[in-house]
Amino acid sequence: MLSVTDLQKTYSSGDEALKGVSLDVTGNETVSMIGPSGAGKSTFIRCVNRLTEPTGGSVELDGLEITGLSGGELRDARRDMGMIFQEYNLIERLTVMENVLSGRLGYVSTWDAFRRKFAGDDIARAYEVLDRVGLKGHEDNRADELSGGQRQRVGIARAILQRPKILLVDEPTSSLDPETSRAVMDLLTEIAAEDDIPVLINIHEVDLAVEYADRVVGLRDGQKVFEGDPPDLDETAKGQIYRGEEIPEGAGPAGKVVAADAPGEAVTEEGDLRST
């Protein structure tokens, strides 16, 4: 279980990227995070695994407080969080197999990592994972020889090889054509279901978010302004998320967060305040 409470991020410029966002992700659910550019979606995911340092709030994974860790403890915690990047984050000159095996670097010594020496079990599983993501036969290809969709699959395979407790996915389809985007989303949701791993995806394409997610979260200006089931994401909710429109009295699905007044608070359809 990932439990994020009142997450905040203020940059040195004074810009507030996150203004107290709370979210739980459990089981093998797929949660899509949507919102306009600059809403704080990528910042949220990067604060969860401390690629970006939060300035307030807490992040817990299976009860372990991530925000207070440093050094080796943080390195160990990151092994449980598989990260899939928008720009793939592959080492272009290395082979597909070498890139995938880098998902096990957190489990080998510095000397073995330098020599790219991995356990036989890890190598065998890397072949299995590459077959699973549709890249069987590409093990020896350099990463820079692959298409965008194939590169994204390498990134997914690398994250799976970590054996993570959660997958954090930052804009996995932004550089892909519609058909390839759906193939990538199919793969991510299949992994969540089959491996019993929750997936948190920051995504721009609302139609994909609705089609593939078990739950949708909407951010605007660093605040959570919507959380609900995909069918609850109606035009009123989209207007609040993308255009900052006021929510008419009585609008919105019952019990769902549709407007945030302050960090840690949200207004429900009934108009009362509750903790987020």
Image (tube, grey):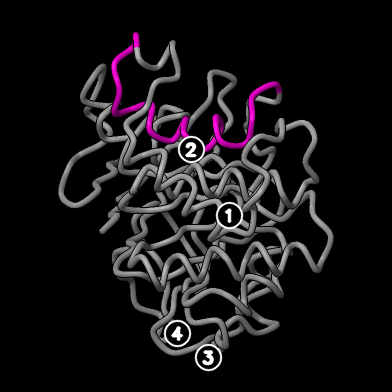
Q: Is residue 202 left or right of residue 27?
A: right
x and y percent of residue 168 in the render? 47, 49
Upstream in sequence: badge 1 or badge 2: 2
Q: Would residue 96 be counted in the magenta stretch?
A: yes
x and y percent of residue 146 in the render? 77, 41
What kind of residue is marked 4? Glu
Q: Which is the main secondary structure of the residues drawn in magenta?
A: helix
Upstream in sequence: badge 2 or badge 4: 2
Q: Nearer the viewer, mark 2 or mark 4?
A: 2
Give the residue number, with chain letter if any, for mark 2: 46
C-alpha separation, residue under disc 1 versus residue under disc 4 = 26 Å
Relative depth, front residue between 112 and 246: 112
Give the residue number, with chain letter if any, for mark 1: 202
What kind of residue is marked 1? Asn
C-alpha separation, residue under disc 1 versus residue under disc 3 = 29 Å
What kind of residue is marked 2? Arg
Q: Residues within 10 Å of mark 2 (few under 14, many from 20)?
A: some
Q: Is residue 62 above or below residue 269?
A: above
Residue at 53% across, 90% down: 250
Give the residue number, with chain letter if any, for mark 4: 269
x and y percent of residue 2 in the render? 29, 55
Q: Residues within 10 Å of mark 1 (few under 14, many from 20)?
A: many
C-alpha separation, residue under disc 2 versus residue under disc 4 = 31 Å
Tag 2–tag 4 contact (CB < 8 Å): no
- Outermost residue to the left: 63
